[in-house]
């Protein structure tokens, strides 16, 4: 039985994760974290009869109960401290919160190796996102130039999204894209060419009416390839991938980025 604590248990993904954990015969929910629901029962907050588990206000508090895996779907300003708190207690981590940069991941990876625990991080645990990342790295071997567009609704606080940050990280491992005119030599306003991250130009759109989407556009003379993921308004696509990660994260020590790192693609 894998004992799980969910940080962000009353949030968008957490509300869908909790019932799935309760229904799984090999998983046990032993902790829940929500700053806004601290002190209440999780069943009361989520409308799940018979679920008397008290909600903790911090990960530190929740991990006083014996825990095997922390799932974090919280906020950019708290996620790093949550993960390091779990690692320090030798608790494995499945990390679905965005907002971390490559330096943060390096620090987390080093801490996980020191303590002998696994951290599996993904900007998006949906299978469609895993496939987008996989296909994009294949395309980058043959298409010399590309840029990335990151879409979300106006309320998303971080940019770029965790999904597109992961794509950029993967693409950088293949090679740097060819750029005909260096960004610094752009006439007019170079800022209009977007942000250079991991060697790739990325453009984040935050507008009402959008849902999570990511697009990688590849170009060669007289041809163009577009790979695009469009998410819906519900969190269901993330649940199966997250629980798969929970079942695999104890099988290694250190940090792995992307659900495909524990899949056979």
Image (spheres, rainbow, N blue to C red):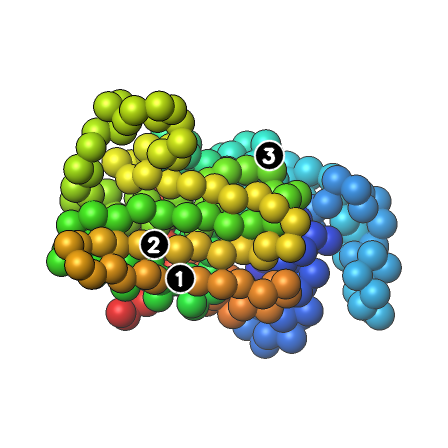
Disc 3 secondary structure class:
helix
Disc 1 secondary structure class:
strand
The answer to whether 252 is drawn above or below residue 116 in the figure is below
- Please tell me which of labels 1 and 3 falls first in the chain: 3
- The answer to the question of whether label 1 and label 2 lie on touching residues, with beta carbons closer than 8 A, is yes
Q: Residue at x 36, y 34 (%)?
A: 193
- The answer to the question of whether label 3 and label 2 lie on touching residues, with beta carbons closer than 8 A, is no
- Please tell me which of labels 3 and 2 falls first in the chain: 3
Can you give x and y, in whole percent of width and height, for residue 72 in the image? 56, 48
- The answer to the question of whether label 1 and label 3 lie on touching residues, with beta carbons closer than 8 A, is no
Can you give x and y, in whole percent of width and height, for residue 12 in the image? 67, 56
Q: Distance from label 1 to label 2 (Cα)?
A: 6 Å
Q: Residue at x 51, y 50 (%)?
A: 151
Is 245 left, or right, of 132 in this rendering? right
Q: Which residue is mark 2?
A: 216
Q: Distance from label 1 to label 3 (Cα)?
A: 30 Å
The quadrant the N terminus occupies is bottom right
Which sits in the foreground, 195 or 75? Answer: 195
Can you tell which mark lies on residue 212?
A: none
Q: Residue at x 35, y 23 (%)?
A: 188
Can you tell which mark lies on residue 228?
A: 1
Can you tell which mark lies on residue 78?
A: 3
Q: Residue at x 46, y 48 (%)?
A: 150
Which sits in the foreground, 24 or 166? Answer: 166
Q: Residues within 10 Å of mark 2 (few under 14, many from 20)?
A: many
Question: Residue 76, located in which quarter of the rendered image?
Answer: top right
The answer to whether 192 is drawn above or below residue 139 in the figure is above
Q: Distance from label 3 to label 2 (Cα)?
A: 29 Å
Can you give x and y, in whole percent of width and height, for residue 258 in the image? 37, 54
């Amino acid at each position: 039985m894998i004992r799980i604590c969910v940080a962000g248990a009353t949030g968008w993904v957490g509300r869908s994760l909790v019932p799935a954990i309760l229904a799984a015969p090999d998983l046990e929910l032993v902790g829940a974290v929500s700053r806004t629901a601290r002190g209440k029962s999780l069943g009361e907050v989520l409308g799940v009869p018979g679920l008397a588990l008290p909600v903790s206000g911090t990960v530190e508090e929740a991990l006083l109960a014996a825990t095997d895996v922390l799932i974090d779907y919280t906020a950019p300003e708290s996620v790093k401290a949550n993960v390091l708190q779990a690692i320090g207690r030798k608790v494995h981590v499945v990390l679905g919160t965005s907002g971390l940069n490559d330096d943060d991941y390096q620090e987390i990876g080093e801490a996980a190796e020191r303590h002998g625990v696994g951290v599996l991080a993904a900007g998006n645990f949906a299978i469609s996102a895993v496939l987008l990342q996989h296909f994009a790295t294949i395309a980058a071997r043959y298409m010399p130039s590309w840029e990335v567009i990151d879409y979300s609704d106006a309320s998303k606080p971080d940019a770029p999204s965790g999904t597109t940050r992961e794509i950029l990280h993967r693409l950088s491992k293949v090679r740097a894209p060819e750029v005909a005119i260096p960004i610094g030599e752009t006439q007019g306003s170079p800022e209009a060419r977007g942000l250079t991250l991991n060697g790739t130009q990325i453009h984040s759109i935050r507008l009402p009416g959008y849902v999570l989407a990511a697009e990688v556009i590849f170009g060669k003379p007289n041809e163009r390839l577009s790979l695009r993921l469009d998410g819906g308004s519900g969190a269901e696509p993330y649940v199966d991938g997250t629980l798969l990660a929970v079942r695999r994260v104890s099988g290694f020590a250190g940090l792995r980025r992307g659900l495909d790192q524990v899949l056979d693609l």
